[in-house]
Amino acid sequence: MISVIIGTHGMFSEEILKSAEMIFGTQENVGSITFKPGEGVENLIEKYNTLIEKLDCTGGVLFMVDLFGGSPFNAASMIAMKHENMEIVTGVNLPMILEVLGNRDVSSLPELLEIAQNSGKEAIKVLAKNINVDMEDDLI
């Protein structure tokens, strides 16, 4: 099974994983890493490596991080560059996590990376308002 590691600034990674588990239930082989004030990349590398040792990474690892170029990304990059079966996607959001969790049993790591990227982009929507329509009339 492919392992999923969510790494973000602050507690966001823990909370977004909790939100995903509200929808999908408790997930196996998934973990979160927090980057707290006062920590450096070396702390994150240690956290990632500790989590990797606990997970079943035989199918590979997908790091899902918040910002390209941020410390969670940089630390994950240093690890992933040394392993062929590790990939990173940035811009983590809840729809992306849900699609990844829903497809990781039937997808390869490259397929899962593409699913993450596409679902993250497709989840961004803008409400198109028609100012010529009176919403109150439509709600009655």
Image: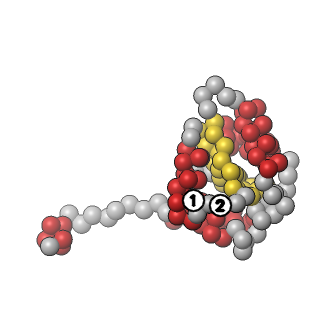
Q: Does residue 78 appear in the picture of this structure?
A: yes
Instruction: Answer with left or right where residue 138 lies relative to residue 80.
Output: left
Query: Percent x, y for residue 139?
Result: 18, 71
Residue at screen point 79% across, 42% down? 50
Q: Give the labeled residue for mark 2.
A: 27
Q: Amino acid at mark 1?
A: Glu
Q: Amino acid at mark 2?
A: Gln
Residue at screen point 49% across, 63% down? 123
Look at the numbered disc 2 and give the secondary structure of its residue.
Answer: loop
Residue 87 occupies which quadrant of the picture? bottom right
Query: Percent x, y for residue 126?
Result: 38, 60
Above-or-below relation of 106 to 91: below
Quick check: marks 1 and 2 in contact, CB under 8 Å? yes
Q: Does residue 77 appear in the picture of this structure?
A: no
**Is the residue marked by circle 1 packed among few (<14), some (14-19), or many (20+) residues within 10 Å?**
some
Query: Percent x, y for residue 20?
Result: 55, 59
Residue at screen point 85% across, 56% down? 84
Above-or-below relation of 21 to 13: below
